[in-house]
Structures are given as C-alpha cells and as structure tokens.
Amino acid sequence: MLYGILAATSALLLAAVLAAVLRVPALRLGIVDRRWRRPMPLSGGVAVAAATCLVAAVGDWKGVTPLGPEVERLLVVGAAVALLGLVADVRRVKARFLVGGTAVAALCVVPYEETGVPAGLLAAGWIVFVALGFKALDHAEGVAGTVGVVTAFGAGACAAAEVMDSVAVLLSVLAAALTGFLMHNWHPARVGLGACGALFTGFVLASAAVTTRAGQELGSGAGVLFALNAVVAADVVLVVLARGLSGRPLLRAAPDHLAHRLRRLGLTPQGVSVVLGVAAFGGVLVGALVHVGWIAATGALWVAAVALVVVLVLLRVKPNVKSNVAPRRVSPQVTTQLRVRNG
C-alpha cells in the first residue's frame, strides 16, 4: 500500500512537470491542436503516457509490484498506441490508420485463453471503441482527464476486488498521471491531451477492464465494461446520431459532443467537467457494484437507459454554441467575393 501511494504521487508530480516543461517545445515544433481558438500545445499526452509507463516500469524493475507477463504486454502495447497517437499529433494521419493500428494493438492484449476467440474479438473491438471514444472526448477543457481519472479508479477497484494487484497499481498510476495533467488542462487550459494521451488513456483503461473481467460471465461482463465507460459511449452515440440525422460527414469536426451541448444549456467549462465527471462516477459505481456482485447485472441496463435518455434529450439542443473549436478560416478572395455579391 505504501508503494502504491508513493507510485501515485510520483506519477502525479512527473506528469505535471513534464506537461509544463514540454509545453514550449510543443509550441515551437507546431505540435498543437488548432481546433481551439488558440493553438493548444499537446504536451499533456506525452506527459501522461511517459509518467505512467516509467513509474510502472520502475516498480516492476525493483520487484516491488511485479507486473506479470499480461500487464507488461499491456504496458508495452499501450506505449506503442501512444506513439501512434503522437505521430497523429505531429502529422495528419488518416482515420483508417489510427483505427487499424489501435485494432492491431487491441488484438495483441486480449487474453484469448480466458475469453475464447469469439468473445476475445468482441473485447478487442470494445477496446478500440473506448480508445477512439476518449480521443473524441478530448475536445474541451478538463473533460477527458476528469472522465479518465474517475474511470481509472473504478476499473482499479474492480481489479483490486479480483486481487489483481498489478492491474490495480497500473490504473492508480494512470489516474495520478491524469490528475497531474489536469493541473494544466483545467479551465483555462494551457496544454492538451492530444491523440497520444487520449488513445493511450482509453486503450489502457479498456484493456485493463477486459483483463479484469476475462473468464467471467459474458452478459454481466459486457454490462460492467459499458457502465465503466458510459460517458464515452454516450458521447460517441450522440455525435453519430447528430451527424447522421443531419446528413453531415461523420469525421468532420463540429460542436456535436456532450460538452458542447451542455455549454449551450448555460454551463461553464468547469461545470461541464464536473457534470460529466459526476455522470462517469455514477456509471463507474454501478459497474463496480455489479462486478463484485452487490447488485444484479441488470443495474448496467439502467445505466444504458439513462445514457440513452440523455442522448435523446441533448439531440434537441442546438449545437451552434461558442465552443473551443476554432472557426473555419475564409480566404481573402472569398471574403472579397462575398462583399461584392452583397453590395
């Protein structure tokens, strides 16, 4: 327990320091997110991934908390996913390469000997869904980090209940690293998570949860996995429905997410993070209680029902709000033509 506290403290401080130190180099190298109203340096993702991997690796090397083959593989593959995300942050990468790379990584960490091949393939698909869902959630200050911290604690509690100490320690280290990142990402944000940190966070969280539930009943397992990531799933479903119903391209950036619509209802950036954090806590609590058997597996269905109602209600909220997404630039030639046309 003492090492767990020391590891979490080290990860928090290391992530906070790295995010601050790497901020200026990220700006100078152009590793920024230009969707915001000002270029947002993406040093947070490297900080979170590096702090998590380094602290966990040191604990394994010293023999204090041996990770074991499965968790070691998860950490190595997670680092590869972070590297893929970093490439996407530095250069424009087509979505199919991100999806394909994350899918290959997910196939490498699923414990097929416990899940079986069919269920293992479904689990790999879920890992990809959550990883990309966290990437989509990284569009507003504090949101992805807050949801990630809450989810990491919930998944860690499930792992601790199964006496999977190495998984629990890894998730506590990730939660601490995300907390250090939030010190710079809370409104007004100075650094962003980027594809590097978002893919890494979602991948590790989903893979750890799949590892924890491996070998248990499939139906309740699916319910637990959904409840642990209910906010991420609701955000993805909301965006898909909104853009599908309006006939807009699915991959074109637009203020369709949960955070955008909550802002339209009058919430502040801090309020949005708190509301989504509380919502994530509700889902995580139900998921953890189902996992330990304190409530029936149907509890996850209530989480799904509430999430669906929220999505349907927010679909009626117009997304044309003042958001962090930068307005599309119009060339001087087009501006001149519009002025002439309008007299």
Image (cartoon, helix red, strand yellow):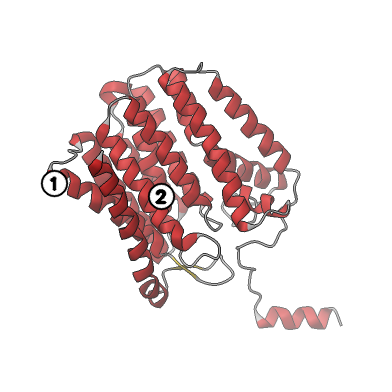
Residue positioned most to the right: 343
Is 110 in front, or is 24? Answer: 24
Picture residue at 59% right of the left edge, 56% below the top: 270
Quadrant where the C terminus sits is bottom right
Picture residue at 80% right of the left edge, 82% below the top: 339
Looking at the image, can residue 232 be seen?
A: yes
Residue positioned most to the front: 2
Looking at the image, can residue 236 be seen?
A: no
Q: Is residue 339 above or below residue 37?
A: below
Is 100 in front, or is 6? Answer: 6
Residue 273 image point, x, y percent: 57, 51
Q: Is residue 327 above or below residue 172?
A: below
Q: CA distance from mark 1 to mark 2?
A: 25 Å
Amino acid carrying mark 2 in the image = Leu
Residue 102 picture quarter = top left
Exactly how many numbered labels are in the figure? 2
- Closer to the observer: label 1 or label 2? 1
Residue 28 image point, x, y percent: 39, 78
For disc 1, the marked residue is: 61
Q: Is residue 329 left or right of residue 316?
A: left
Residue 309 image point, x, y percent: 68, 33
Residue positioned most to the left: 62
Q: Is residue 94 left or right of residue 104?
A: right
Residue 52 image point, x, y percent: 30, 51
Residue 37 picture quarter = bottom right
Q: Is residue 212 above or below residue 54?
A: above
Quadrant where the N terminus sits is top left
Judged from the image, the secondary structure of the residue bearing numbered disc 2 is helix
Picture residue at 65% right of the left edge, 32% below the top: 308
For disc 2, the marked residue is: 199
